[in-house]
Image (cartoon, rainbow, N blue to C red):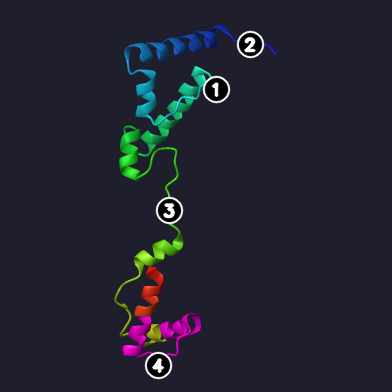
């Protein structure tokens, strides 16, 4: 398959190549640009393909409101191109469990906890919606079982 270029296209390609080479010669080095935009040069790709992919990184980082990959990482908490690592749900839930039951005065929620504790933890609480010493002990038992 033959590639057909008109004079204008050829001129644009040559100017782009010269511009990029001049930037690399007189501006930041290739390694510095890669580091600035969080790009890892792929030796299996052509220089042009690598530059285009680096430019995509640059555009995405700028679109997110950052001036370089370092700022992006500081702002988001993870490196550009990596997905944030989320803790398993059970770990998130454990961190959100209050040490003191927040619904002690809500009879309906207290009754729901008593029912849940009886069904899931083998408890023998009276489901009356009253937060007494046995319900408090059950809550503390549940907290201790989640912290292990």
Q: Nearer the viewer, mark 1 or mark 4?
A: 1
Local crowd at mark 1 within 10 Å, few (<14), some, or many (≥20)?
Answer: few
Look at the image and tell me whether residue 132 can be seen.
Answer: no
Tag 3 residue: 86
Dividing the picture into quadrants, the one containing residue 35 is top left
Percent coordinates x, y for residue 57 in the rendering: 43, 31
Percent coordinates x, y for residue 140 in the rendering: 34, 79
Local crowd at mark 3 within 10 Å, few (<14), some, or many (≥20)?
Answer: few
Look at the image and tell me whether residue 27 can be seen.
Answer: yes
Tag 4 residue: 128
Task: Give the structural element (helix, strand or loop) at label 4.
Answer: loop
75 with respect to 114 (left or right)? left
Percent coordinates x, y for residue 144 in the rendering: 37, 74
Closer to the chain start, of discs 1 and 4, is 1
Q: Are marks 3 and 1 in contact (CB under 8 Å)?
A: no
**Magenta stretch bounds:** 112-139
Dividing the picture into quadrants, the one containing residue 3 is top right
């Amino acid at each position: 398959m033959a590639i057909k270029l008109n004079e204008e296209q050829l001129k644009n390609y040559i100017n782009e190549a010269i511009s990029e080479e001049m930037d690399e010669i007189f501006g930041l080095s290739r390694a510095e640009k890669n580091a600035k935009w969080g790009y890892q040069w792929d030796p299996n790709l052509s220089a042009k393909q690598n530059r285009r992919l680096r430019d995509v990184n640059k555009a995405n980082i700028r679109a997110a409101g950052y001036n370089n990959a370092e700022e992006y990482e500081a702002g988001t908490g993870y490196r550009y191109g990596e997905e944030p690592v989320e803790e398993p749900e059970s770990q998130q839930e454990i961190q959100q469990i209050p040490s003191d039951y927040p619904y002690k005065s809500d009879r309906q929620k207290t009754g729901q906890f008593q029912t849940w504790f009886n069904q899931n933890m083998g408890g023998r609480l009276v489901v009356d919606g009253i937060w007494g010493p046995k319900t408090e002990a059950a809550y503390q038992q549940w907290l201790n079982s989640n912290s292990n």
